[in-house]
Image (cartoon, rainbow, N blue to C red):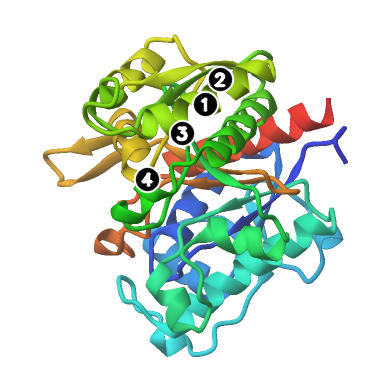
Amino acid sequence: MSEKKPILAITMGDPAGIGPEILLKTLADKKVYEICSPLVIGNVQVFKKIKDILKSTLQLHPIQEVPEAGFEYGRIDILPIEIPDIREIVFGKISASAGEVAFRCVEKAIQLAMSKAVDGTVTCPIHKSAINKAGHHFSGHTEIYAHYTNTSNYAMLLADDAIKVVHVSTHVALRDACDLVKKERILEVIRLLNGGLQDLGVQSPRIGVAGLNPHSGDNGLFGDEEIKEITPAVNQAKAEGYNVEGPVPPDTLFALAKGGRYDGCVAMYHDQGHIPFKLTGFEWDKKSGVMKSVKGVNITLGLPVIRTSVDHGTAFEIAGKGLASPDALLYAIDYAVKMVRNKSN
């Protein structure tokens, strides 16, 4: 399979969000078919509605098994997932039916990847409240993948051309995040980041590790997590042969990474990594009042399968209006292809 263009299962995301729209826009780009064989997992009725909104001439080709796919530009191969109650699907509205179909798309993609029917998976955004309303109690894609692949050691990597950052913790309260800054977890994340960067083609990654506190604690003046947890983790990583520095003050680490000093960064909690990443990758259009371009990619490290995703949400406020940018999905596909290629070499 690795000698051919990789087959990527691409999930629709929440049908009430922008996922189906950015997917159709992405597959209208012939370059996608030049680097991979895309297989969409989603609801045909929803895509028909989006086709009408976009006035798209792309054909929809429902199939039941992967071998039935033709992977021809202009004809989208879709593994159909039915919606419990299509009447509940309203653009910009949370519903159990939307959450159920979004969840089942992800579940199917994981099954295909685990059985090696596809080479990798790419996900469009889901809405956490919708999937929980449907009875699936996960905080996001990362946790769904970890559960269904039986993975205990994993981390979220955000990637673009300027910055690549992985997190010690993600979807927890900030008060809890501080308690999760522990040596073993930091060391585990350094190892995962090093492997992830190698999967993206960086042979000898240079890694910068953020401090938790202002000025990295300033020798214990503003907190002692750097002394007790972060520095020991960095020293252990160095002893294991990793090219790592830290703790680096958080207010300078990402500027250094953007300037080329580090190939990847370790953030201590969700917003510490997300804010600088989105500042470099998201472009706001003042005139239209919407995001003009969103280029961030979310990669789950530590899984037995490849999973990349857009790093933005369902954008309910513009869903169904034809305004969504497909840039992040194009990047996510490109990164998935890179990971397939590097893992097969």
* Residue position marked by numbered label 4 in the rendering: 270
Which sits earlier in the primary sequence, circle 2 or circle 3? 3
Q: Are marks 1 and 3 in contact (CB under 8 Å)?
A: yes
Q: Return the residue at label 1.
A: 232
184 left or right of 8 in image: left
Cα distance in 3D space between marks 1 and 3:
6 Å
For the residues marked 4 and 3, what is the alpha-carbon distance in whole angstroms? 18 Å
Q: Position of residue 147 (x, y in %)?
A: 65, 64
Q: Earlier in the sequence, mark 2 or mark 4?
A: 2
Tag shown at residue 229: 3
User: How far is disc 2 from disc 1 in space, using C-alphas?
Assistant: 5 Å
Taking the image as shown, residue 304 lies to the left or right of residue 267, namely right
Q: In the rendered image, which residue does mark 2 sit on?
A: 235
The residue depicted at 42 percent of the width and 68 percent of the height is 128
| Mark-to-mark CA distance, 1 and 4 | 22 Å
Helix, strand or loop at disc 3? helix
- Across and down, in percent, residue 52 comes to 42, 66
Relative vertical location of residue 257 with respect to residue 81 in this rendering, above or below: above
Left/right placement of residue 226 relative to residue 27 reads left
- Helix, strand or loop at label 1? It is helix
Quadrant housing the C terminus: top right
State the image coordinates of residue 103 (x, y, percent, origin top left). 56, 72
Q: Are marks 2 and 1 in contact (CB under 8 Å)?
A: yes
